[in-house]
Amino acid sequence: MKKSGVILILVLCLVLAGSIILQLSDAFSEPTANKMKLYTAGKDAMPAPDKILSNSVNVFTVLLFEDGKVYSYYGNKVNEGVQSKLSDGSFQKLLLEAKEKYKEQLQVYLKPSEAANYQSTVDLLDQMTINNISKYAMVDLSVFDKKIIDSVFK
C-alpha cells in the first residue's frame, strides 16, 4: 500500500508540473504589440512635412529603400544626408546621435518607399520604440523624396 501511494503522489506531481509548463508556454507564445503614439492637433502636434522650415534641424527625415537601406538627413539639409542600413546597426547609431543631440525636441519622419518591404518598415518602427523616440510619424513620400531616392540608391 505504501509503494502504490508513493507512485500515486509521483504521478500527480508529474501531471501538475506538466500542466504548469503547458500554461507557461501558452502565456509566453502569445504575440505582443507595440503601442503606436498618434499625435493630435494641439500643443504637442508634429508640423506637417511641407511646413518644415530650413532652421528646423531637429527634424530627422528617414527615407527607407529596399533591403533595409536608409538615407537620413536633418531639416532641409538633404545634401548632407547619410546612407546606412537597418541590419548592420549603422542606422541605430545615427538615431542615437540625433536623440543625444536634440533630446526631447527630436522629431522623426519615417518615409518608406514602394520598394521597401514590410519587414524593413516594421524594423524601422521597432527602432523608434527601442531607442525611446517619442515624436515620430510615418509619412508618405513626396515627389521630391522620390527624386532623392532615385539619385541616392539607383
Image (cartoon, rainbow, N blue to C red):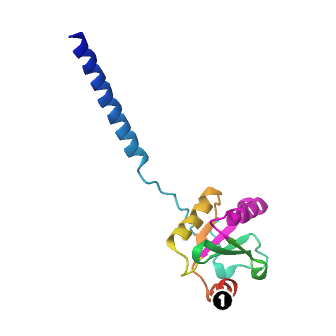
Question: What residue does disc 1 label?
Answer: 147
Residue 56 drawn at (x, y percent): 76, 74
Q: Which residues are magenta?
A: 85-111
Q: Residue at x 39, y 43 (%)?
A: 25
In this view, the residue farthest toward the front is 3
Q: Quadrant of the C terminus?
A: bottom right
Residue 31 drawn at (x, y percent): 43, 54
Asked whether 93 falls inside the magenta stretch, the response is yes
Asked whether 70 falls inside the magenta stretch, the response is no
Q: Secondary structure at mark 1?
A: helix
Q: Is residue 47 above or below residue 28?
A: below
Residue type (three-letter) at the residue carrying disc 1: Lys
**Residue 49 can be seen in this image:** yes
| Left or right placement of residue 106 versus residue 1 in this view | right
- Please name whichever residue, 89 or 131, is drawn nearer the observer in this view of the structure: 89
Q: Residue at x 57, y 65 (%)?
A: 123
| Left or right placement of residue 8 versus residue 38 in this view | left
**Residue 42 can be seen in this image:** no
- Please name whichever residue, 4 or 47, is drawn nearer the observer in this view of the structure: 4
Q: Residue at x 41, y 51 (%)?
A: 30
Q: Is residue 64 above or below residue 1?
A: below
How crowded pointer 1 is (Cα within 10 Å; few <14, some 14-19, many 20+) is rated as few
Q: Is residue 106 above or below residue 143?
A: above
Q: Quadrant of the N terminus?
A: top left
| Left or right placement of residue 47 versus residue 114 in this view | right
Residue 64 drawn at (x, y percent): 61, 75
Q: Residue at x 68, y 80 (%)?
A: 51
Residue 84: image quadrant is: bottom right
